[in-house]
Image (cartoon, rainbow, N blue to C red):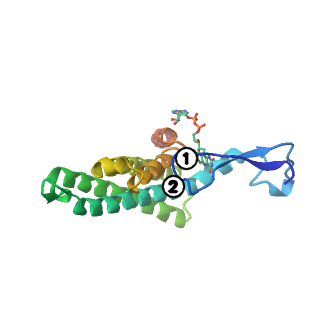
Amino acid sequence: MKGFEFGKKEDKMGIRASATRELVFTDCKIPKENILGKEGMGFIVAMKTFDQSRPGVAAQAVGIAQGALDLTIQYMKDRKQFGKSISSFQGLQFMLADMATEIEASRALVYACARMLDSGNSKVSKDSAMAKLFASDVAMKVTVDCVQLFGGYGYMRDYPIEKYMRDAKITQIYEGTNQIQRSIIANHLIKETAAK
Ligand SMILES: Cc1cc2nc3c(=O)[nH]c(=O)nc-3n(C[C@H](O)[C@H](O)[C@H](O)COP(=O)(O)OP(=O)(O)OC[C@H]3O[C@@H](n4cnc5c(N)ncnc54)[C@H](O)[C@@H]3O)c2cc1C
């Protein structure tokens, strides 16, 4: 449309393969037939879109966390310290067990939410927010721990693990920050209780 153009390409910490740009509207006129939903209902349309897109961000977070864990287990099997593979140290094994359990819990929440959406259930706002919140917090925690398990190499760009940590961060921010997800969940809980 006349009056619309892309602005600056943002220089981001992570998800650098996905371009993020400013959208600039200058006296841009949009024809009536392009309205999404009804006039004045834009906020509702946006919120309903988030109900569908937040489980997608949650799935992205599960993938980042699982990818980081897979790489880390392989690295730990190869890396020898004190004459042993570091995967034989019980303290580190406990970290692996916690990470795998949390990832599996995130995956279960994403699948539960996806099943609700697939069945046509329109009351998914709380579940979408829970899936996005939980999976993204798990992805952040897991990727930070994976960097730790790589030791000094974890901090180097030569190894791929730091990228997972940078990519995980955005999942706590976009499609509504995790503070906002907590507010949504709490508001639903309070409303549900008042309705009983
Ligand atoms: C790479 C990237 C891609 C993005 N893509 C999209 C996209 O495709 N579509 C889209 O709509 N948006 C997108 N966003 C925007 C993103 O959703 C917002 O940045 C995000 O919602 C936070 O809003 P804000 O940046 O204005 O932060 P602010 O609202 O200024 O928040 C700053 C801090 O205050 C906290 N905060 C704010 N209000 C409250 C409150 N009421 N209670 C408690 N804490 C609060 C926030 O959680 C945050 O920690 C993208 C952002 C980035 C970085």
At a point 81% along the width and 56% down the height, the residue shown is: 34
Q: Is mark 2 within 8 Å of ligand 1?
A: no
Residue 71 is tagged as none
Which residue does the numbered mark 1 point to in the structure image?
Answer: 174
Q: Are marks 2 and 1 in contact (CB under 8 Å)?
A: yes
* Element under disc 1: loop
Mark 2 secondary-structure assignment: helix
Disc 1 under 8 Å from ligand 1? The reply is yes
**Residue 163 placed where, x, y %?**
44, 53
Dot 2 or dot 1: first in sequence order is: 2
- Please tell me which residue lies in front, 46 or 187: 46
Nearer to the camera, 190 or 55: 55
Query: Can the viewer see residue 22 in this picture?
Result: yes
Q: State the mark number for residue 57.
A: 2
Residue drawn 25% across the image and 59% down it: 76
Q: Amino acid at mark 1?
A: Tyr
Q: Residue at x 50, y 53 (%)?
A: 128
Which quadrant holds the N terminus? bottom right
- Where residue 72 appears, as percent x and y from the top left, is 31, 58
Distance from Cα at disc 2 to Cα at disc 1: 8 Å
Left of 43 or right of it: where is 155? Answer: left
Q: How would you rate the neighbour count of disc 2 (Cα within 10 Å): few for under 14, some for 14-19, many for 20 or more?
A: many
